[in-house]
Amino acid sequence: MMRRLLPFLFALPLTAQAIEIRHFDDPDKQQRYERLIEELRCLVCQNQSLADSDADLAQDLRDEVYTIIQSGKNEEEAVKFLTDRYGDFVLYRPPFKVTTALLWIGPFLLLAAGGALLWRQVKRRNTADDLALTDEEKKRLERLRNNLEG
Amino acid sequence: MRYLIPLAVFAVMVIFLGIGLTLNPREVPSPFIGKPAPMFALPQVADAAKTLSRDDLKGQVSLVNVWASWCASCREEHPVLLQLAKQNIVPIYGLNYKDERDKALAWLQRFGDPYTASAFDPEGKTGIDWGVYGVPETFVVDRDGVIRHKQTGPITPEILEKKLLPLIRQLQATPS
């Protein structure tokens, strides 16, 4: 029984979308619209995209994006419509600015710092005296050499 | 030395996280501060034959308060607005957001009407143009129709005394 139901489980959509049915005169526009609302952030449920949010405002903003895209304008104009009103906050991918520099570069800085730290540790360990032979080991090496040669 | 670096990293993290705790994540900085108020011309709530538009805001410092009868926090701030209206310091214009006229009128009748006039925006289009995302919101607009401040969420007596009134007085004192 379970085995027979399993394929259906995988057939279920993984992301539930709070979405109206939209009609586009061009499948390309539909694609652009769907991509856009995934990338724009809802201001009411701030951890959801416009596509996921069921908030009233998200629905209104989807309407606006739809109207803009359907009228033949490009994505930038839809994004500008929203950032003009709500600021960069609506973008899940904020533009690179002085105020967002740390956000963008931060991870790489941390990676570089971590790398440098690791490098130093490894280097120190390589040159450290624990790699040098102890007196006992030297004697043993000597003995082995003698055995081989003798 | 061995403990100094982790300690310094820890201290920096504490500072950053500490600052983070004091910020309000619901507060989205408005891109309108310092910019002219967005254009609008809507029928008034009390009288559909009359319009309220951006031009009505010009010539005096004013407050634009976004409200709705369905909005619970609006009731919370309502006494503060009524009090302010009584003092005759600054005209309060309402933007009735995504509401129904009957309900809006009934609400004003029941709780009092602090507004010089309220614009009726049932579809919320003007609300979107003003960047409204959580009612109530209040904008301080200067004499030239430029937005100077935005308060998201209900106005408390403290916010009014400490933030809004000083700003309003300052704007009223500066000649346009």
Image (spheres, coloured by chain):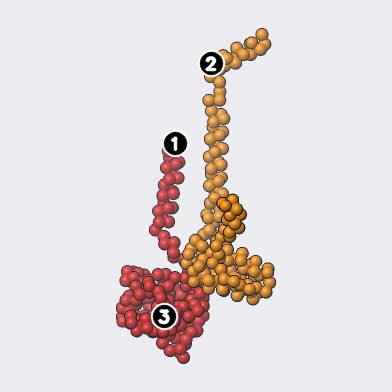
Chain colours: A orange, B red
Q: With B158 as the anchor, is B9 left or right in this view?
A: right
In the rendered image, residue A42, in percent from the top left (x then y), is placed at: 51, 66
Disc 2: CA contacts within 10 A as few (<14), some (14-19) or many (>=20): few
Query: Which residue lies at the image location 52% right of the left edge and 69% below the top edge?
Result: A58
Query: Which residue lies at the image location 63% right of the left edge and 11% below the top edge?
Result: A146
Closer to the camera in the image, B22 or B107: B107
| Chain designation of label 2 | A
| Chain designation of label 1 | B
Q: CA distance from mark 1 to mark 2?
A: 31 Å
In the rendered image, residue B150, in percent from the top left (x then y), is placed at: 43, 71
Disc sitting over residue A136 in the figure: 2
Secondary element at tag 3? strand
In the rendered image, residue A39, in percent from the top left (x then y), is placed at: 57, 63
Location of mark 1 (residue): B2
**Which amino acid is tagged 3?**
Gly
The answer to whether residue B114 is above or below residue A108 is below
Disc 1: CA contacts within 10 A as few (<14), some (14-19) or many (>=20): few
Q: CA distance from mark 3 to mark 1?
A: 62 Å
Disc sitting over residue B145 in the figure: none
Query: Which residue lies at the image location 44% right of the left edge and 86% below the top edge?
Result: B44
| Chain designation of label 3 | B
Can residue B55 be seen here? The reply is no
Location of mark 3 (residue): B94
Closer to the camera in the image, B8 or B30: B30
Task: State the residue lying farthest toward the top.
Answer: A150
User: For residue A71, what is the image quadrant?
Assistant: bottom right
The answer to whether residue A97 is above or below residue A67 is above
Q: With A25 as the anchor, is B1 left or right in this view?
A: left
Q: With B108 as the anchor, is A101 left or right in this view?
A: right
Secondary element at tag 1? loop
Q: Earlier in the sequence, mark 3 or mark 1?
A: 1
